Image (tube, rainbow, N blue to C red):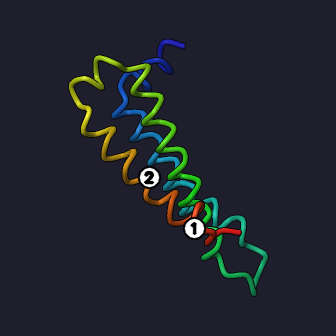
Amino acid sequence: MHKLKKLFVSPSRLYGWSFAGFLLLMFIGIPALNFGHKGRVPLGDIIIAIAIYAVILFLISLITTIVYWQWFKKYWYVNLLVAAGSGYVINIYLLSGLIA
């Protein structure tokens, strides 16, 4: 348990691990899901994965504001940029109706 706690000791590591998980999904998960489908184009899966990752980033930025308050007071602009960027992607993909 101590090693797991060490992995998530700061929000920057939390953002880094979420990005690493997103890259694993993009380069390993989506091709594995489309392995037997010759006529299926994975572009829709990629867009859905980006929209889901934007929602996850938005939730992480909200959670880190509460849980890591000392870090947030020092690096508030990081959470602001992440929340604004992911909110923009959420607005484009999810709220505009591009993903039905």
Neighbour class for label 2 at 10 Å: few (<14), some, many (≥20)? Answer: many
Q: Residue at x 53, y 52 (%)?
A: 53
Disc 2 to disc 1, C-alpha distance: 14 Å
Residue reaching furthest to the left: 74
**Which quarter of the rendering shows the C terminus?**
bottom right
Q: Residue at x 37, y 50 (%)?
A: 84
Q: Position of residue 78 (x, y in %)?
A: 28, 40
Q: Residue at x 37, y 33 (%)?
A: 13
Residue reaching furthest to the bottom: 39
Q: Which residue is mark 2?
A: 86
Residue 9 bears which disc, if any? Answer: none
Q: Is residue 8 left or right of residue 77?
A: right
Q: Secondary structure at mark 1?
A: loop
Q: Is residue 62 left or right of residue 41?
A: left
Is 13 located above or below residue 42 in the figure?
Answer: above
Is 40 located above or below residue 78 in the figure?
Answer: below
Q: Nearer the viewer, residue 79 or 34?
A: 79
Q: Nearer the viewer, residue 66 or 42?
A: 66
Number of numbered discs on residues: 2
Residue 96 bears which disc, if any? Answer: 1
Q: Position of residue 48 (x, y in %)?
A: 62, 63
Amino acid marked by disc 1: Ser
Q: Is residue 76 left or right of residue 23?
A: left
Q: Position of residue 32 (x, y in %)?
A: 68, 65
Quadrant in the rendering for residue 43: bottom right
Q: Check if mark 2's residue and mark 1's residue have beta carbons within 8 Å.
A: no
